[in-house]
Amino acid sequence: MDPRAAAQAGPAAPTTETVRRTPRRAAIDVRANLTLLAVVTLATALQLFGLPILLREWGTAALVLIVPLVVLTPTHWGLIHEAIHGQLFAGRHRNEVVARALAIAFALPFDAVRFGHLMHHRFTREPFDRPDVLDGSRPLWQVRLAYYGRLLGGLYAGEVVLPLLAFAPANVARSLVSRAIGAEGAAGVDVQRLFASFAADSARRARIRRDWLFTLALFALAFYLYGTWWPVLAVTMYLRGVWLSIADNLPHHGVPLDEPGRSRNFRVARAWQGVLMNHHLHRLHHQHPTLPWTALLALERETRSDSSGSIEPAYFRSALRQFSGPGAIDAATTS
């Protein structure tokens, strides 16, 4: 984890749970990370530059290649995620450079994504971080529209256009972010202040503007290469955005505030573990955020007896269960 970013995220919010955090160390599996990085790099090159050539040569038969491009979405994000926690490579600078390049290729603002993720770790399931919880102050139709819109790609779309705030005056950006985050909950004032400070930080705003211009140039070139096939690129990015949006809050959906790590682990077929970069073991990741993804399976086997024989829910079935809609949260455990 980036020590400066973690420090800027502020102190962890008080919770009613007790999480066992055992000091652990595990070596970064650089070979595994480089292998996945090579796969994602090739897939990105195929999506942006190779597929338009194949579409002109093969026609609609080339559309089948969209499937592996979409399937690799969690791997692409997983590499960025590992770098955010400093677990992709040993050097901090290399982590940031690679993650920033991967984020640009995914049209994500790296600085904002990194800050938001670290805040998510420190203030998990605080009011700003509960998209699945019913908001009784708003009409139900508005709540449902916002909820399903977020699930069906809205989260990703919001991240794509978020850099526009970096082009607005700093005081405007600060005001908009403060209003969006709110100050509810025991840690709400601190959370709001930290997000507002981030939105007004001149160095971060400059980096976000620069990265966004790189992203615009990259995708402008890609759309030009696709020519009349440009809807294929748009649909592919949308489908990848839907996957990212559905997976974002999945481990926390419906989780009471007194549940360990305020998150869940899931079971998934072995073939998916590498693709997901073990993100299905999300509770373990929250309890041990400095462990590399390759160490989580061994830790899960070691701590499996702690679950008292309970069976973890299935990852993909739980993803679909989110479409049942937002719900209430245990009022006895709210902050």
Image (cartoon, grey):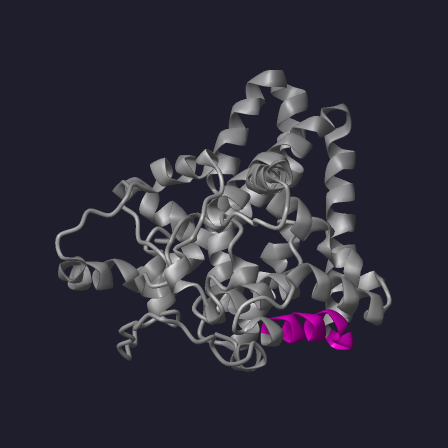
**Is residue 138 among the parts visible in the rendering?**
yes
Q: Please name the predominant secondary structure of the magenta segment in the image.
A: helix
Q: Where is residue 9 in the image (x, y as percent from the top left)?
A: 56, 76
Q: Quick check: 198 left or right of 131?
A: right
Question: Which residue sits at x=82%, y=70%?
Answer: 170
Question: Which residue sits at x=57%, y=49%?
Answer: 136
What segment carries the magenta color?
A: 191-203
Q: Where is residue 224 in the image (x, y as percent from the top left)?
A: 79, 35
Instruction: Let me know if residue 196 is in the magenta part.
Output: yes
Question: Which residue sits at x=33%, y=60%?
Answer: 283
Q: Quick check: 263 left or right of 301?
A: right
Q: Above or below — where is 249 with respect to 180?
A: above
Picture quadrant of residue 219 = top right
Q: Above or below — where is 200 with respect to 139?
A: below
Closer-to-camera residue (13/247): 13
Q: Where is residue 96 in the image (x, y as percent from the top left)?
A: 58, 69
Q: Quick check: 133 left or right of 49?
A: left
Question: Which residue sits at x=59%, y=56%?
Answer: 102
Q: Where is residue 195 in the image (x, y as percent from the top left)?
A: 65, 70
Instruction: Let me know if residue 176 is in the magenta part.
Output: no
Q: Above or below — where is 158 with respect to 110?
A: above
